[in-house]
């Protein structure tokens, strides 16, 4: 019985330490709406696409990136239903070729990624952001 108690204590301490670290990583994923370069340290992902594919807030499609449905939302995406998110990469906006851009962007060059939901995105970027926005700042882009 003592062995079981010791292992239970060890497991509890390990879980508490993981929760206290605040890294946002759980089960091989990066959680949350802001991802920084320090969050990406020691991860196996080599492209921005792989990083975002491991974020539970997003659904990666063949052509578009969509917000995953959350409580109170009936479908993926925002008001435009089925169109992907706007990408703002180092200040430049695009809706075209977003997945290809993310696949070509080196994860080691990422300074910060912010995922904006439609209501917040529209306030900043207007109607082109009706399905949310991925704001990516790279180390090389300024």
Image (cartoon, rainbow, N blue to C red):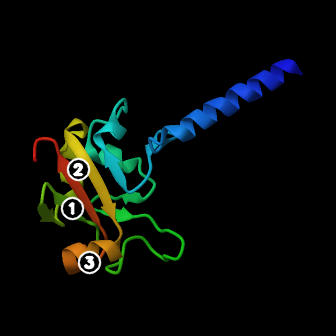
In this rendering, position of residue 91 left or right of residue 103: left
| Residue highlighted by disc 3 | 123
Q: Nearer the viewer, mark 3 or mark 2?
A: 3
Q: Position of residue 81 (x, y in %)?
A: 35, 77
Q: Which residue is at 42% across, 70% downward?
A: 76
Q: Which numbered marker is on residue 56?
A: none
* Residue 109 sits in quarter: top left
Mark 3 surroundings within 10 Å by alpha-carbon count, few (fewer than 14), some (14 through 19), many (20 or more): few
Mark 3 and mark 2: span between their CA atoms?
24 Å
Counting residues from the start of the chain, the first of labels 1 and 3 encountered is: 1
Mark 1 and mark 3: span between their CA atoms?
15 Å
99 vs 6: above or below? below
Kindly state the secondary structure of the residue where label 1 is placed. Answer: strand
Kindly state the secondary structure of the residue where label 2 is placed. Answer: helix
Q: Nearer the viewer, mark 1 or mark 3?
A: 3
Which is more toward the observer, 113 or 46?
A: 113
Mark 2 surroundings within 10 Å by alpha-carbon count, few (fewer than 14), some (14 through 19), many (20 or more): many
52 vs 98: above or below? above
Q: Position of residue 71 (x, y in %)?
A: 54, 71
In this rendering, position of residue 133 left or right of residue 70: left
* Residue 83 sits in quarter: bottom left
44 vs 37: above or below? above
Kindly state the secondary structure of the residue where label 3 is placed. Answer: helix
Q: Position of residue 27 (x, y in %)?
A: 52, 40
Q: Nearer the viewer, mark 2 or mark 1?
A: 1
In this rendering, position of residue 75 left or right of residue 14: left
| Residue highlighted by disc 2 | 102
Asked if marks 3 and 2 touch (Cβ < 8 Å), the reply is no
| Residue highlighted by disc 1 | 87
Q: Which residue is at 27% across, 45% downward?
A: 48
């Amino acid at each position: 019985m003592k062995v079981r108690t010791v292992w239970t204590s060890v497991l509890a301490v390990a879980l508490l330490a993981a929760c206290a670290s605040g890294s946002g990583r759980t089960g091989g994923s990066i959680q949350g709406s802001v991802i920084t370069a320090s969050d990406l340290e020691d991860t196996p992902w080599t492209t921005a696409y792989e990083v975002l594919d491991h974020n539970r807030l997003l659904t990666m499609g063949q052509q578009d990136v969509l917000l995953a449905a959350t409580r109170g939302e009936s479908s993926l995406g925002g008001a435009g239903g089925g169109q992907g998110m706007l990408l703002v990469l180092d200040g430049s906006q695009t809706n075209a070729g977003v997945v290809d851009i993310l696949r070509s962007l080196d994860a080691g060059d990422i300074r910060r990624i912010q995922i904006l939901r439609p209501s917040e995105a529209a306030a900043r970027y207007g109607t082109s952001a009706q399905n949310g926005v991925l704001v990516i700042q790279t180390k090389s882009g300024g």
